[in-house]
Amino acid sequence: KSGFISIIGRPNVGKSTFLNRVIGQKIAIMSDKPQTTRNKVQGVLTQNDSQMIFIDTPGIHKPKHKLGDFMMKVATNTLKEVDLILFMINATEGYGRGDEFIIEKLQTVKTPVFLVVNKIDAMHPDDLLPIIEKYQKLYPFAAVVPISALEGNNVDTLLEQIKEHL
Ligand code: GDP
Ligand code: MG
């Protein structure tokens, strides 16, 4: 099985950290500052029975100027062409306007979407279910997977579920 997987989400939710963990190389730039991933960085995870091609997709945010508008169109087209979208959120933050904008974009594509709830290491377990329920009311996710990209919790489970969807 093989396929293209696009990772989207607000700045700082942990997209680059996740990509670096699964690919095992520093291919995406990690930083506390938003918008440091300037290019569509691709990483390939080859296993004995599968190949996953990950795309770190910047530009899915409300455009503030013409160039942003163009980048957004490029990003939206990418979402239409991939096999699976990982919509990553930060479990320690609530639902925000950035997410609202992304969900609007997701509603324009037919690609299946996983909700990846990241940073579960930094939250109280009781807070997890309310967050998941909030997002599930807004979009029919093909799967919901809580992870810690930083510590690696549940990342293997996520990779297994991705494989099943390719
Ligand atoms: P991106 O903007 O979505 O690519 O986010 P980054 O991967 O650059 O991560 C932003 C910040 O969140 C960094 O300081 C990371 O170390 C931190 N971070 C990423 N994943 C996790 C996680 O699972 N748990 C915790 N506690 N911090 C994380
Ligand atoms: Mg990044």
Image (cartoon, rainbow, N blue to C red):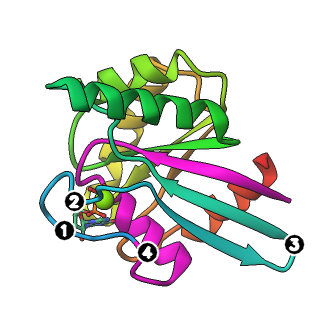
Mark 4 Cβ inside 8 Å of ligand 1? yes
Q: Earlier in the sequence, mark 1 or mark 3?
A: 1
Q: Single out the mark in the foreground, 3 or 2.
A: 2
Q: Which residues are magenta?
A: 1-27
- Is there any visible trace of residue 12 in the rendered image? yes
Residue density around tag 1, few if under 14, some if 14–19, many if 20 or more, within 10 Å = few
| Amino acid on which disc 3 is placed | Asp
User: What number is the disc on residue 125?
Assistant: none
* Quadrant where ligand 2 appears: bottom left
User: How far is the residue under mark 1 from the one under mark 2?
Assistant: 7 Å
Q: Is mark 1 within 8 Å of ligand 1?
A: yes
Residue that badge 3 annotates: 49
Between residues 92 and 108, which one lies in front from this camera angle?
Answer: 108
- Secondary structure beneath dot 2 equals loop
Cα–Cα gap, marks 3 and 2: 33 Å
Alpha-carbon span between mark 1 and mark 4: 12 Å
**For marks 4 and 3 on the same chain, the one whose residue lies earlier in the sequence:** 4
Which residue position is annotated with label 1? Answer: 31
Marked residue nearer the N-terminal end (4 or 2): 4
Q: Which mark is residue 20?
A: 4
Within the image, what quadrant is residue 61 found in? top left
- Lower position in the chain sequence, tag 3 or tag 2: 2
Residue 69, x across and y down, in percent:
28, 25
Q: Is residue 44 left or right of residue 9?
A: right
Tell which tag, 4 or 2, sits nearer the viewer: 2
